[in-house]
Image: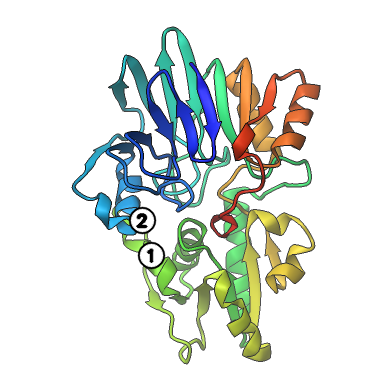
Amino acid sequence: MDVHFQPAGIYVSDLDLWLDPAEGVEAAWLSHGHSDHARGLHRRAWATPETLEIYGERWPESVGRDRRAVGYGEQFEWRGAQCTVLPAGHILGAAQLLIEHRGERLVYSGDIKLRAPLCGVAAEIAPCDRLIIECTFGLPIYHFLERDDAAVRIVAFARECLDEGVTPVFYGYALGRGQEIVHGLCRAGIPVAVHGAVARFIPLYEQAGYGFDGWQPYEAKQTRGKALVLTPSMGRIVEARGKNFRVAYVSGWAALANARAKAGAEELIPYSDHGDFSELVAMIERSGARRVDLVHGYTEAFAHILRQRGIDAHAAGALTGVEDDAAEI
């Protein structure tokens, strides 16, 4: 299949199909609901039901257009190709797309992780001839926690703070990690106050079967005795309120010591909805792909590392560089 990497997205010209395009197109596959992937008004779009719900929240003008929901393990046909939807483990509804056309198997991963997520479905690795995979954390310096270890660290920090009469603060991005943090705290019976940007998507996670008993909307003057899940943009507000708060940073970037100063955090918990270096290598090797195209992140460096391992890896043109929407990471 002829694949073009362009500023507007990834274009499979044989099928006239765009993968996570940045602007409106005739036919699009949307891998997940983050704003750097599900955007633009498309004449026709395929995605999982959860992703379409999120996409519709952010792009209400898309409701009523030709939006086609396909669940994990389901297939659809497009211009002679058989397309299969596979879980990606990233956030709620995140999916890979396996395209089979004229004897070739191509997989587009979207954002992906191999370790099981706190909320979501673990990724499935499909054998393929060609793999297009994101590599946001494609350097050996990035090592992340397993989900159970991350949950233990989150709960332990919250309880330690509350026992000392201090308010624990977790920075959680609006979609994905924020809900996972809230879910873990609620399961442990810890009272939680949640910023509206994170709370907005909790009902979608509840529809998918995840429990959030006991959370309350965040109110600045009613934080005593609660753990707070806020967006990173509120960091300066927390700093201004003084020593009654302690901050934990739950992120892939927390794998680096300098994240403590950058995030204004005391506790670093390296848990991500993206794969770390070892996960990315494992997924690529398990796919058996003869060619690997790398998008987002440390593409040039990671391609060099993979080629040293005997893998035909390429940094994918216009999409190279660290993701613009780091707020989703």
Res 84 → quadrant: top left
Residue 206 placement, left or right of 142: left
Tell whether label 2 touches label 1 (CB within 8 Å): yes
Give the amino acid type for the residue marked by disc 2 in the picture: Tyr
Viewer-side label of 1, 2: 2
The image shows residue 319, relative to residue 267, as above or below, that is: above
Disc 1 secondary structure class: loop
Camera-side residue: 122 or 63? 63
Spatial CA span between label 1 and label 2? 9 Å
Q: Return the mark for residue 168.
A: none
User: Residue 232, how many percent across, how many down?
Assistant: 57, 70
User: Residue 148, how many percent across, how many down?
Assistant: 58, 52
The image shows residue 225, relative to residue 119, as above or below, that is: below
Camera-side residue: 149 or 175? 175
Camera-side residue: 83 or 43? 43
Residue 114 placement, left or right of 143: left
**Residue linked to disc 1:** 212
In the rendered image, is residue 41 in sight? yes
User: Residue 113, how many percent across, how many down?
Assistant: 56, 40
Give the amino acid type for the residue marked by disc 1 in the picture: Phe
The image shows residue 227, relative to residue 91, as above or below, that is: below
Dot 1 or dot 2: first in sequence order is: 2
Residue at the location (37% across, 25% down)?
16
- Number of disc labels: 2
**Residue linked to disc 2:** 205
Disc 2 secondary structure class: helix
